[in-house]
Image (cartoon, rainbow, N blue to C red):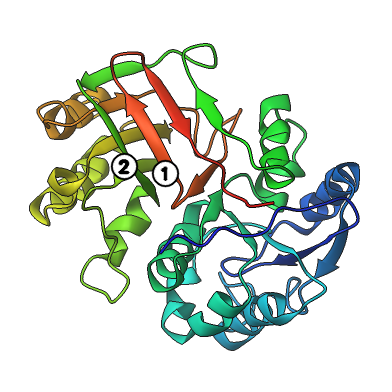
Amino acid sequence: MMLLPKKLKRGDTVGIIAPASPPNQPNLEKSLSFLKELGVNVKMGKHVHEVNGYLAGSDEERLADLHAMFQDPSVQAIICAGGGYGTARIASAVDYELIKRNPKIFWGYSDITFLHTAIRQQTGLVTFHGPMLASDVGKEEFHALSKKMFYQLFEPMELHYSEEITPLEVLAEGERIGEIVGGNLSLIQSSLGTPFELETEGKLLFIEDVDEEPYRIDAMLNQLSMAGKLQQACGIIVGDFKNAVPTNEKPSLSLEEVLESYLGNLEIPVIKGFKIGHCEPHFSIPLGAKAKLSARSKTLTIMPGVRS
């Protein structure tokens, strides 16, 4: 059952956690002025500044921050400081009943994909795939549209993506309605064979990635295809694949050729070119919300991700 979090209002408190890698601290600091612009207060997770190799603190510390923010009645939304690596390490230990009892806005992307999938499939909670504080908001370049996308948290609103935003390319024809699921392709792949394996049956599957060569994307799509995940979906939304180029002189297929070979012959709508992912602007979307993907009109229409 779909569980919508309650919308934010000015004066509410946003909790900040780092469930993956250590965030860039100067950028995190800079991002706080944007949250002030939104009119919300900030509560830092106890372990946001911890560094444990490539992790932002131990598994226990990162998990404790996640639990504390969902448990805290003074916190209305949780925004991740950054991604990197590490959320899959804590997924098995998350108290999903606690989240179900205290549904609230949860926002992030990239490595956070594993938590998005686990939380939604265990609780039904709609979560948000959007730019993170240290990784995006606190950088010199943060696009006006990326900023604007945060306002979907303050009022239930339909989102519309068309070619007015960026050019879109149809890889396979059709028009379907379903819940949006997915996120970072490598994290989707790493969920296979686990208790948190992404369910795609009858869903609109969204994929994106960064710094992956075409042969790596080929391998990931091949595994998803062999697992039936592409064929079970009712449509595929291809987001941004930043730096998806070969890094040596050896012959290679292009990203376009790889996508065409796996997605071009599916009997469901497949559209690529969406600025969703490691890109600017970054169009934020509610995962688990109902949406309509139309190859006819080259549009994606998404129902609100919050309730009044």
Q: How far is mark 2 from mark 1, CA to CA?
A: 9 Å
**Residue under numbered circle 1:** 290
Q: Quadrant of residue 142?
A: top right
Q: Residue 120's x, y, as percent? A: 44, 64
Q: Earlier in the sequence, mark 2 or mark 1?
A: 2
Q: Is residue 193 left or right of residue 103?
A: left
Identify the residue at horizontal 41%, vertical 33% (top origin).
239
Disc 1 packing (10 Å; few <14; some 14–19; many ≥20): many
Give 228 or 60, whichever is nearer the viewer.
Answer: 228
Q: Residue 165's x, y, as percent? A: 54, 16
- Indicate which disc residue 178 carries: none
Q: Secondary structure at mark 1?
A: strand
Q: Is residue 95 left or right of residue 295?
A: right
Q: Quadrant of residue 56?
A: bottom right
Please tell me whether mark 2 or mark 1 is closer to you in this view. 1
Q: Residue 77's x, y, as percent? A: 71, 62
**Residue under numbered circle 2:** 204
